[in-house]
Amino acid sequence: MKLESLKELFVEELKDLYSAENQILKALPKMIKKASSNQLKSGFEEHLEQTRGHVERLEKVFQQLDESPKGKKCKGMEGIITDGAELMEEDAEPDVMDAGLIAAAQRVEHYEIAGYGCVRTYARLLGHSNVVQLLDATLNEEKETDAKLTRLAENVNVEAKEAA
């Protein structure tokens, strides 16, 4: 596909995020099951609900743009999730596994933060102020989740260190 305009790039990047969010919806239940920390399980459960909302917001964005969200597989997220799945197959102490799960989740968040930051900027440049608000809400939630994971890691990483 030849991208000839910022609008075309904008739609392609939105499709990428839509695919990424749907992949995350499938991965989070596995992470919840593998986590041993109740706080981490709770955080992943909360993010699962939030991710459902992100998909719904993206569907609203596509409706407003009169575009389809289908037709693209996010290979970047697929790789990040594959790495996380490989981690979950490891034989690890519970605290060490939790530390690894947090790292995997933060990779997901950072990918999403980058993606949502870009599409929000494109939406602003293209004059889609209603879309900017939807994307900004999701971007802010992704940043909050990353900050929560960082705070959680401060305890979990210490516990993982002491497991050695």
Image (cartoon, rainbow, N blue to C red):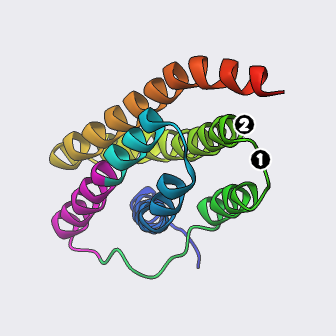
Q: Do we see residue 39 in this rendering?
A: yes
Where in the figure is residue 56, as x and y percent of width and height? 22, 62
Res 77 → quadrant: bottom right
> Of the numbered discs in the image, which one, if any, rests on residue 92?
1
**Above or below: residue 110 compared with residue 49:** above
CA–CA distance in space, label 1 to label 2:
6 Å
**Residue under pointer 2:** 96
- Count of marks overlaid on the render: 2
Q: Residue at x 47, y 43 (%)?
A: 118
Res 54 → quadrant: bottom left
**Above or below: residue 155 compared with residue 126:** above
SS label for mark 1: loop
In the image: residue 144, left or right of residue 81: left
Residue type highlighted by circle 1: Ala
Q: Residue at x 79, y 54 (%)?
A: 91
Magenta-colored stretch includes residue 56: yes
Q: Residue at x 53, y 55 (%)?
A: 31
Where in the figure is residue 115, as x and y percent of width and height? 49, 47
Mark 2 Cα-neighbour bin, 10 Å: few <14, some 14–19, many ≥20: many
User: Which residue is at the front of the view, 102 or 34?
Assistant: 34
Q: Are marks 1 and 2 in contact (CB under 8 Å)?
A: yes
The range drawn in magenta is: 49-67
Where in the figure is residue 2, as x and y percent of width and height? 58, 75
Q: Residue at x 42, y 46 (%)?
A: 44
Where in the figure is residue 50, as x and y percent of width and height? 29, 48
User: Which residue is at the front of the view, 89 or 24?
Assistant: 89
Residue type highlighted by circle 2: Val
User: Which residue is at the front of the view, 77 or 43?
Assistant: 43
Q: Do we see residue 5 in this rendering?
A: no
